């Protein structure tokens, strides 16, 4: 079965603009709010959102960081595959700040749980919010929901949602793939 395209570049652009405006409305100058993108796939989304916020709200204090969760995952020792960690780059404190975690797809919630554990290494946030491009809402294993959501995709467990970014994959798109048995 060929993959099914869920979102094209124009639709992704519209969603990203909406999400950036929602963040601007809720956080104004970003004096007490930081964006932390989950490596690796959330980094592109975090960068895009950050650029749009800076474009639409010139005088803001937005800070963006990148968080690797590899060794905070509950399954990192359960595979024979050698894991490759990404760089964590958080050059600010999250103490008493609102942290907006950013990831491309929310599936079971396990990556977000790992990110919640990992972010504590950088201080104690006042509040943590979640922004995702895609919410696979019927596949959650943990009680985690996004505060900011691009779109919801109803998919089966034997399907995979993959976000393609122009920076990495030469196109902006979201596809639904059926896993081979």
Image (cartoon, helix red, strand yellow):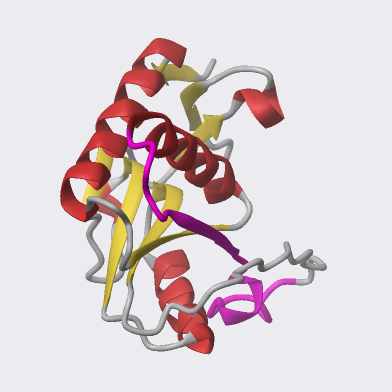
Q: Is residue 171 above or below residue 181?
A: above
Instruction: Measuring from the top left, give residue 121's x and y in whole percent.
Output: 53, 87
Instruction: Measuring from the top left, give residue 34's x and y in whole percent.
Output: 40, 62
Q: Is residue 105 in view?
A: yes
Residue drawn at x 51%, y 33% is 163
Instruction: Measuring from the top left, give residue 124's x and y in whole percent.
Output: 38, 88
Q: What is the quadrant of residue 82 in the picture? A: bottom right
Q: What is the quadrant of residue 21 in the picture? A: top left
Q: Is residue 64 above or below residue 117?
A: above
User: Would residue 17 be counted in the magenta stretch?
Assistant: no
Residue drawn at x 77%, y 67% is 83
Horizontal relation, residue 158 to residue 73: left or right? left
Name of the residue lying farthest toward the right: 82
Split into 4 quadrants, where in the image is the C terminus? Answer: top right
Horizontal relation, residue 105 to residue 25: left or right? right
SS majority, magenta: loop
Residue drawn at x 38%, y 37% is 58
Q: Is residue 154 in view?
A: no
Horizontal relation, residue 43 to residue 106: left or right? right
Residue drawn at x 17%, y 51% is 26
The part of the chain drawn in magenta is 57-79
Horizontal relation, residue 104 to residue 25: left or right? right
Tally of numbered discs: 0
Q: What is the quadrant of residue 47 in the picture? A: top right
Q: Is residue 92 above or below residue 123?
A: above
Instruction: Measuring from the top left, give residue 133's x and y in whole percent.
Output: 37, 39
């Amino acid at each position: 079965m060929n993959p099914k395209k869920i979102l094209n570049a124009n639709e992704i652009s519209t969603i990203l603009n909406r999400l950036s405006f929602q963040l601007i409305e809720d956080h104004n100058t970003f004096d007490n709010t930081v964006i932390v993108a989950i490596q690796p796939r959330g980094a592109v989304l975090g960068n895009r959102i950050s650029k749009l916020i800076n474009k639409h709200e010139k005088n803001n204090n937005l800070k963006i960081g990148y968080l690797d969760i590899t060794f905070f995952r509950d399954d990192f020792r359960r595979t024979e595959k050698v894991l490759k960690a990404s760089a964590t780059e958080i050059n600010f404190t999250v103490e008493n700040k609102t942290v907006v975690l950013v990831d491309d797809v929310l599936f079971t919630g396990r990556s977000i749980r790992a990110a919640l554990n990992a972010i504590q290494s950088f201080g104690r946030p006042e509040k943590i919010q979640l922004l995702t491009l895609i919410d696979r809402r019927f596949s959650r294993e943990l009680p985690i929901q996004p505060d900011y959501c691009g779109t919801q995709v109803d998919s089966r467990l034997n399907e995979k949602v993959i976000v393609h970014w122009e920076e990495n994959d030469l196109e902006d798109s979201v596809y639904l793939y059926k896993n081979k048995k």
